[in-house]
Image (cartoon, rainbow, N blue to C red):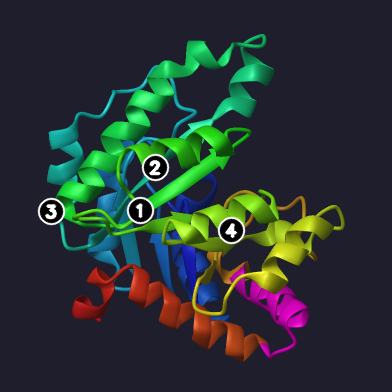
Amino acid sequence: MYIDSHCHLNFPELASQLPEILRSMQAAQVDQAVVICTTMEEFAAVQGLAQQHPNLWATVGVHPDNEGVHEPRLQELVQGAADPRVIAVGETGLDYYQMDERKGGRTVADLEWQRERFRTHIRAARQVQLPLVIHTRSASDDTLAILREEGEEGGAGCAGGVFHCFTESMAVARAALDLGFYISFSGILTFKSAAELREVARWVPSDRFLIETDSPYLAPVPYRGKTNNPSYVPFVARQLAELRGCSPEDIGRQSTENFHRLFARTRSLN
C-alpha cells in the first residue's frame, strides 16, 4: 500500500537490523523502498541491497554535502545507472546550510564544487533518461537556476525528478512543479514547527507528491527523536491524509501511482 521513496538502509543504524526492518515494513504494509546512494564508495552496498531484495530499489549519486569522497565522473554515474535496479540519479543538489554552519561561514563562491557536482549529475540523468533525486537546503534559488540552465525544463532527455524531504516555501514548491518535478514529504510534516510546510502539503496537486522517511533520520511523531526506518512512512501518510481531507489508504494509493509514474523503470520490473 505504501512506498518509502527515500531511505538509507545501508547506513549502520539500519543495516545491522535489516531482517527486522524488512519484517516491520511488511507488517506496516510498506511494499517497497528506495535505498539512496550518497557516495560512490557506498554504491556497491546500495546496489547490492536492491539486487538481493525485490522490494528495494537503488539510486546512484553523491550527496552535495559530502566532501573528501570520490568525486563522481559522468561516465561513472551513467555506468551505475545501467543496472535495472537503479531507478534514479542522486541524491544530488546543493546544501549551503551545512557548509555555513560547519566550515565557518563559507561564501557562495566557495561552493562552486557543489554546483559542478550537481551539473554532472543532471547531465548523467539526462543521458540515461532517469529522474533526479534533489536535495536542496538553504540553496533553493541556485538549485532551481542550475536546473533551468541545464535545460531540465522539458528539454530533450529530461526525465524530471523529485525534491526529496521538502522543507522549502510555497514559491519553491511552485517553481519545482513548473520544472516538472514532484514533491516528497517526510516525517517533518508531523512536527509542530512545520505549519508552513503543512500548507504546501495541502496545496500540492494529487498527482505530484511522494512520501518518504529519509531514515534513519527525521522519525515522525510519535517516534520523533528515535531511529527512523521505512515502516514509519504510514505516519507521514496519515498526516498528509489529515491535511488533505482523505484517508491514509487514499494517500497510499495515490503516492504509489505517482511513484511508478515518476520512476518508470519500476513498472517494467514489477
Residue at x 26% of width, y 56% of height: 158
Mark 2 lies on residue: 147
Q: Earlier in the sequence, mark 1 or mark 3?
A: 3
Left or right: residue 49 versus residue 253 is left
Amino acid type indicated by mark 3: Ala
Look at the image and tell me whether residue 114 can be seen. yes
Magenta portion: prevailing SS class: helix
Cβ atoms at labels 1 and 3 below 8 Å apart: no
Residue at the image position 63 percent from the left and 56 percent from the top: 228
Q: Which residue is mark 1?
A: 153
Image height of 246 relative to 55, above or below: below
Q: How far is the residue under mark 1 from the one under mark 3?
A: 24 Å
Mark closest to the chain's N terminus, 4 or 1: 1
Q: Residues within 10 Å of mark 4 (few under 14, many from 20)?
A: some
Q: In the drawing, what numbered circle is on residue 261? A: none
Q: SS class of the residue under badge 3?
A: loop
Segment tinted magenta in the rendering? 233-247
Q: Magenta segment: does it hold 234?
A: yes
Sooner in the amino-acid sequence: mark 2 or mark 4: 2
